[in-house]
Image (spheres, rainbow, N blue to C red):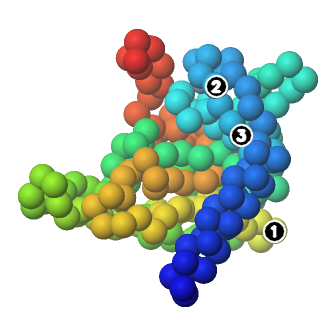
Amino acid sequence: MFIVALIAVFIAFIVAIAVWYEKNAVRGVCPTCTTEVDLLHGVGACGRCGEALRAKENGFVPVEAGFVPDHPRFLARFSRLKPPSTWKIIWPGRCCVCAGSATREEKMDVKSVAGQVGPMLTPLNITASDEFAVGYCASHSDGVRFSFPPGIGYAKKNEQCMLAVRSVDYYREFMRENGLGRQVSEEAGG
Ligand SMILES: [Zn+2]
Ligand SMILES: [Zn+2]
């Protein structure tokens, strides 16, 4: 009985999240790669080509340079990035939100899936842990978040690990330096 109640609560939770997402997501077509994308509150990065987008009356347009939303909204999925151990520090000595002089540095512990070992059906993930530093001025925080969702064992994939970035300029620079590049053409067929 308890299990049933627990499952019911879990399902209600999932449905609530789905409803909330439907209400807050804006659907449109990426002007760069023509993929249909959903963006929470109409601001974010295209999941396919990585273009930073915002909703306008007639669909999505690339975000103007200098744009900084209230929260990190531009998601960089690890499956589209070079291995974290090779990442270049972006804007060294400067704030990752406003690009002003940094007064402190935050070291993030970035975990990623580096590979798998063991039998094909039940392999074990090898996770890597790398340090990535971001700078902040005295008036900013919460410029870059790292998300490593609780995946179940080897089911966790690098697509589920991501950085969320607030400043679009920082995000674009990060993708230029540490991204795998646009993958529009090679995926166009499939
Ligand atoms: Zn796109
Ligand atoms: Zn700042």
| Amino acid on which the number 1 mark rests in the picture | Ser
Label 2: which residue? 36
Q: Residue at x 68, y 58 (%)?
A: 15
Q: Nearer the viewer, residue 12 or 37?
A: 12
Q: Residue at x 76, y 45 (%)?
A: 22
| Amino acid on which the number 2 mark rests in the picture | Glu
Q: Is residue 146 above or below residue 160?
A: below
Q: Quadrant of ligand 2?
A: bottom right
Q: Nearer the viewer, residue 132 or 157?
A: 157
Image disc number at residue 39: 3
Residue 40: give x, y in percent of width and height. 74, 45
Task: Specify the farthest residue to the front.
Answer: 1
Residue 158: give x, y in percent of width and height. 38, 51
N-term mark: 2 or 1:
2
| Drawn side of residue 106 relative to residue 81, left or right | right
N-term mark: 3 or 1:
3
